[in-house]
Amino acid sequence: MSYSNSTPSTDGRNVKGRSLWDEPGDSPCPPPTAQAAPPERRKSYRQRYPDSLPIDVLEWLQLNKPQSYEELMDLRRALYARRTTGVYRIRLGGLTLLGEQKILLTGRASAVLILSDKARHFLLRTLCRLRKSERWPPIRY
């Protein structure tokens, strides 16, 4: 009786198979590999473009805080209409990868790049809180 690793197939060829007496290293299947590393996360905007314009809205607001109720209204109008109003200059900058409009907002002291409507609405909500803290009159158009 022969105990070899080849077994005859139906078409007459010898097919390499595994018998009960084979060593574990003789397996025709490759050994299991270590878990693959998880895919790298996509880099943030600041990591991809380190020398670009700042995108921190709160920092920009500290440097360019409206001095009066009229300036606050100018900034709100500029953000809603996406047009230059008063001392706040708006420049549209095309679309992001997600299809949202990029806006360059320039104030008295510096500029900020607004990359999404979410950031623009955050700035508008923050301006509403600023109006309440300064005890300025309600917003009426």
Image: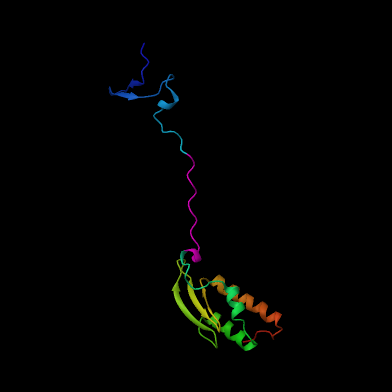
**Front position in the image: 105 or 74:** 105
Report the magenta stretch's main SS: loop
Q: Which residue is farthest top? A: 1
Q: Which residue is farthest left? A: 12
Q: In the drawing, does residue 119 fall left or right of residue 7?
A: right
* Total labels drawn: 0
Q: Quadrant of the N terminus?
A: top left
Q: Quadrant of the C terminus?
A: bottom right
Q: Is residue 141 above or below residue 8?
A: below
**Front position in the image: 4 or 80:** 4
**Front position in the image: 37 or 127:** 37
Residue at figure coordinates x 70%, y 82% from the top left: 134
Residue at figure coordinates x 58%, y 76% from the top left: 60
Residue 99 x, y percent position in the rendering? 46, 69
Residue 89 x, y percent position in the rendering? 51, 84
Residue 96 x, y percent position in the rendering? 46, 69
Residue 135 x, y percent position in the rendering? 72, 83
The residue stretch that appears in magenta: 34-47
Q: Is residue 13 above or below residue 48?
A: above
Q: Is residue 1 above or below residue 50?
A: above
Residue at figure coordinates x 48%, y 39% from the top left: 34
Q: In the drawing, does residue 53 fall left or right of residue 11?
A: right
Q: Is residue 124 magenta?
A: no
Colour theme = rainbow
